[in-house]
Image: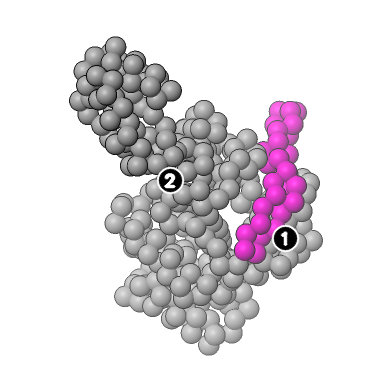
Amino acid sequence: MIHTRGLTRVFTVKKERVEAVRGIDLDVEAGQLVAFLGPNGAGKSTTLRMLTTLLPPTAGTATVAGRDVAGDPAGVRARIGYVGQRNSAGENFRVRDELVTQGRCYGLDGRQAGTRADELLDLLDLRPLAKRKPGTLSGGQRRRLDIALGLIHRPGLLFLDEPSTGLDPKSRAEIWQHILRLRETYGTTLFLTTHYLEEADSMAERVVIIDNGRIIADGTAEQLKNDLAGDHITITTATDQEARAAAELAGATAEGTTVRVRVPNAAAALPDYLRTLDGSGIKVTAAETTRPTLDDVFLTLTGRSLTDDDIPA
């Protein structure tokens, strides 16, 4: 569904050359749900804009849904759906009329557009809202309408840019239920950005992380966490001296009375570590194991947090 080689975008800012995206190679297979992550300024939005034909590449190639983004942008647009961060629907027409109008813009006749609108109203639980105007809907309801508008022409690939930003936890959970239902119903390929790392961790089957215009990690969330971050054992000792001794036994470092040890499998390693400490006369007052997060992966790779300055506009 997506195939890029050397995809590059350069801007000129105050007569200075700025490489926003630097030679990205990316392949996304049909039916995948891919989370594309990166802090502000990493090149995430620029890449998304190039893939959706909103911004021409400076160099490299990109084929999206079987069409070249530079040579056939109209062909790409006819085959993809795009849900941006802002609301897509207008304010003057009712919800169903918005969907029908969008369908007509994609070349459906009146009957086809109406049938497809009704199908999406049911799929996204919008049927009770069909006669209301978008301006009267809640944030979660409007996002469901945005997704319906992006699906009206049955695209095989749907781009979702921060689909749950600004929603309360209940609405976020509902949006994700509908997103996952799309895959079950249509087998839609989903390529999304999000700054909610727990969403990418639990929902996406593949995570791609971009930083400074380059892809620095690509795999399942579990693979990235296991290979690049690892589990942690955290223990607390009675004294600073005991903590330093406990850290030395594990090849770690201590902070006051706390020792944090990185291991491949914390649950399996903890009993042996505690036995070793007990045999060395080190008194442990507390112990816990933690699984890494995607932010830990990014921290390992770059030395900073993935969420640094990543506040949506």
Q: Is residue 100 above or below residue 295?
A: below
Residue 61 shown left or right of residue 35 in the figure: right
Q: Is residue 312 visible?
A: no
Range of the magenta residues?
1-29
Residue 122 pos. (x, y %):
38, 78
Task: Give the color scheme: rainbow, by chain, secondary structure or one colour.
Answer: one colour
Residue at image x 53%, y 54%? Answer: 206
Circles 2 and 1 in contact, beta carbons < 8 Å: no
Residue 241 pos. (x, y %):
29, 12
Q: Which mark is residue 87?
A: none
Residue at image x 39%, y 29%? Answer: 261
Q: Secondary structure at mark 1?
A: strand
Would you name the residue on which mark 1 appears?
63
- The answer to if 220 sits in the magenta stretch is no
Residue in front for this viewpoint, 34 or 64: 34
Give the Cα distance between marks 2 and 1: 28 Å
Residue at image x 63%, y 35%? Answer: 212
Residue in front for this viewpoint, 35 or 149: 35
Secondary structure mostly taken by the magenta-highlighted segment of the chain: strand
Neighbour class for label 1 at 10 Å: few (<14), some, many (≥20)? Answer: many
Q: Secondary structure at mark 2?
A: helix
- The answer to if 13 sits in the magenta stretch is yes
Would you name the residue on which mark 2 appears?
197
